[in-house]
Amino acid sequence: MTTLALLLLTALSAAWGAHAVWLLHRLRTARRDPLTGLWTRDAFTRQARRLLRNRHAVVVLADVDRFKQVNDTHGHAAGDALLEATASRLAHAVGRSGVVGRLGGDEFAAVLVDRDGTAADQLAVLARILARPTETAPEVHTSVSLGWVRRADHPDEDLSALLKRADEAMYAAKRAPASVRRATIGRLLASVTGRRPGRRSTA
């Protein structure tokens, strides 16, 4: 092979390598929520299903309380700051071994692996952290309701069903003094009523 051919081959390989890196970056960017940097629903779903192979997995659903009121009173910039802070705090709490995604609006989901059985305590602490005002919007005071369910309690259910259980628990938490509620082991109410129990508007 001539020197010129070798140089051309090297340059071509470098170009293809750079193109592959660019494509990978674009793909990862498309899977990230542009505001919070969390995984989008589809990307979260793929990773969450993988984590659910572990019987110690816990599914968590989080929803910002009175989010529409925050936007109406303090403006959308304050609302965005609240979403960013919530996302950052959730991601930090779950860590690299878990996954957190923004499902849309002010609703987030996470799957973590609770090997030592301390999820209830961890989530109680997390709820208090999520209720702290953000540095960029200290005038905003609200809380985040959490609903969660253990994979081991419902080993035959898929991610969709577990999210529904966590959703029911989360809206039960909104109606109670506590900000955290664990899903019950009984039947899934959403499968009976055909709608999310206690589902409210974003007001």
Image: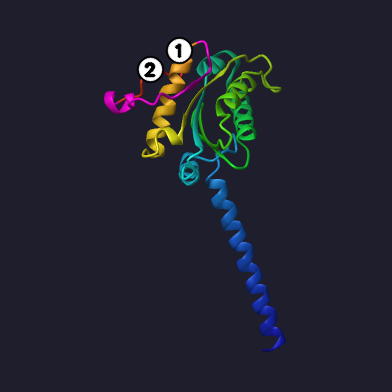
Residue 129 % position (x, y):
64, 22
Q: Quadrant of residue 91?
A: top right
Residue beneath disc 2: 198
For label 1, the SS is: loop
| Quadrant where the image shows the N terminus | bottom right
Q: Is residue 92 above or below residue 133?
A: below
**Residue located 53% across and 19% down the image:** 67
Check if mark 2's residue and mark 1's residue have beta carbons within 8 Å: yes
Q: Residues within 10 Å of mark 1 (few under 14, many from 20)?
A: few
Could you tell me how many numbered marks the image carries?
2
- Residues in magenta? 177-194
Q: Quadrant of residue 171?
A: top left
Residue 178 magenta-highlighted: yes
**Residue linked to disc 1:** 175
Name the residue at 45% across, 36% down: 151
Is residue 2 left or right of 31 when viewed as pictured?
A: right
